[in-house]
């Protein structure tokens, strides 16, 4: 029997985005699933309620796993918790999987905790580490070369004023180390026009870019997609929810390559032949939330869902360049 749900999923600190679309496109939900971004457990519990035999809950955030222990116990052997990242997904699973779900980016829980340093709306230490170990965002902004900072802001945040902001960061840290989210947000905001009503905070793109760099999110995503490919049984499903165009571009590109539907930049170039599809697409286009879901959960506004079904073809490695991952040359401080 399923373990008890601690109230409706909409009451969780992290509302599972596009969960109804995932369940609808994955029906019937059976077998063993891996939730690669466990968070508050919204996806895992929904999968269990929909019919999954067991769920392996993976998260790189120790706090998320500690919180999960309180509800996972109610499911007994149907839930197994594992600490780790996307790139270790296959090893952490330890068995063939019927489904994998990945909800990318930062969670609402992390954003709401000022001491985690993810949000420019709450002053706190400039941290941004999902795993709570390794170099912090403060280490990056205070030590990285100006050119590296500019590249990070541009490639990971699509920030057009990247060079101006990087120059301002280097100038500010020369006087005093940048240690808090409020201080970094202030430096960035001074480099950009004041936002009009309804526009996002000026520091939004910069904070996204720095967070991605600190947590190596793009390389983890690329490796995690391939780990899921190796771990899934024939017929198994890979469902990925993205929240900005850079993430979605990587996921879309992966599925194009893996399903044999690679887009051709040059229509006069000969088409590739002999490509064996490793995934069949369940969602032909990205699925977006409807108006009702956005009203319930504004975080879902920018979300996109893509789902592929694993074929029996052998897994095949894909290079970061093939997925369009930007390369950033790491240098020391100048």
Image (cartoon, rainbow, N blue to C red):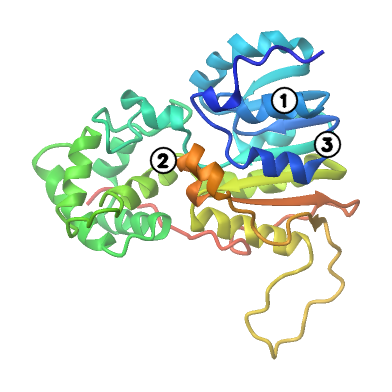
- Identify the residue shown where x is 47% and y is 59%: 327
Q: Compare residues 65 and 298 and report the one nearer the observer.
A: 298
First reached walking from the N terminus: tag 1 or tag 2: 1
Q: Is residue 295 left or right of residue 79?
A: left
Residue 56, numbered label: 1
Dot 1 and dot 2 residues touching (CB under 8 Å):
no
Determine which of the numbered discs, if any, sits on residue 229 in the image. Answer: none
- Residue 208, above or below 38: below
Snapshot quadrant of residue 69:
top right
Q: Which mark is residue 214?
A: 2
From the viewer's side, name the closer residue of 173 and 165: 165
Residue at the far left in the pictured view? 175
Mark 2, other Cα within 10 Å: few <14 / some 14–19 / many ≥20: some
Provide the secondary structure element on which disc 2 rests: helix
Q: Nearer the viewer, mark 1 or mark 2?
A: 1
Check whether the beta carbons of the residues at disc 1 and disc 3 lie within 8 A of each other: no
Q: What distance separates the C-alpha of mark 1 from that of mark 2?
A: 26 Å
Label 1 to label 3: alpha-carbon separation: 11 Å
> In which quadrant is the N terminus drawn?
top right
Mark 3 nearby-residue class (10 Å; few <14, some 14–19, many ≥20): many
Residue 223 screen position, x and y as percent: 64, 46
The spot of residue 179 in percent (x, y) is 21, 33
In the rendered image, residue 100, in percent from the top left (x then y), is placed at 73, 38
Q: Residue at x 44, y 45 (%)?
A: 212
Residue with the mark numbered 3? 98
């Amino acid at each position: 029997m399923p373990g008890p749900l601690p109230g409706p999923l909409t009451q969780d600190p992290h509302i599972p985005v596009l969960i109804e679309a995932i369940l609808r496109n994955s029906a019937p939900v059976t077998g063993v699933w891996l939730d690669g971004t466990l968070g508050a457990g919204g996806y895992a519990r929904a999968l269990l309620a929909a019919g999954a035999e067991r769920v392996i809950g993976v998260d790189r955030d120790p706090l998320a796993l500690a919180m999960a222990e309180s509800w996972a116990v109610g499911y007994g052997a149907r839930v197994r918790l594992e600490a780790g990242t996307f790139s270790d997904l296959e090893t952490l699973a330890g068995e063939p999987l019927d489904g994998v779900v990945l909800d990318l980016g930062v969670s609402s829980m992390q954003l709401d905790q000022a001491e985690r340093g993810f949000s420019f709306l709450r002053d706190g230490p400039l941290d941004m580490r999902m795993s709570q170990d390794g170099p912090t965002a403060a280490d990056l902004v205070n030590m990285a070369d100006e050119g590296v900072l500019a590249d990070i802001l541009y490639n990971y945040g699509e920030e057009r004023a990247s060079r101006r902001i990087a120059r301002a960061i280097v100038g500010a840290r020369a006087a005093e180390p940048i240690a808090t989210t409020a201080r970094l947000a202030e430096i960035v905001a001074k480099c950009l026009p004041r936002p009009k009503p309804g526009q996002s905070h000026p520091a939004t793109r910069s904070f996204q870019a720095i967070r991605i760099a600190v947590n190596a999110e793009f390389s983890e995503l690329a490796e995690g997609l391939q780990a899921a490919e190796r771990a899934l049984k024939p017929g198994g499903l890979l469902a990925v929810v993205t929240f900005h165009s850079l993430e979605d571009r990587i996921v879309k590109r992966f599925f194009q390559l893996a399903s044999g539907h690679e887009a051709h930049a040059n229509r006069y170039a000969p088409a590739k032949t002999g490509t064996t599809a490793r995934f069949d697409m369940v969602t032909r286009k990205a699925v977006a939330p409807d108006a009702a879901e956005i009203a319930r959960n504004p975080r879902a506004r920018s979300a996109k869902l893509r789902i592929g079904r694993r074929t029996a073809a052998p897994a095949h490695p894909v290079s970061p360049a093939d997925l369009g991952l930007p390369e950033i040359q790491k240098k020391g401080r100048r």
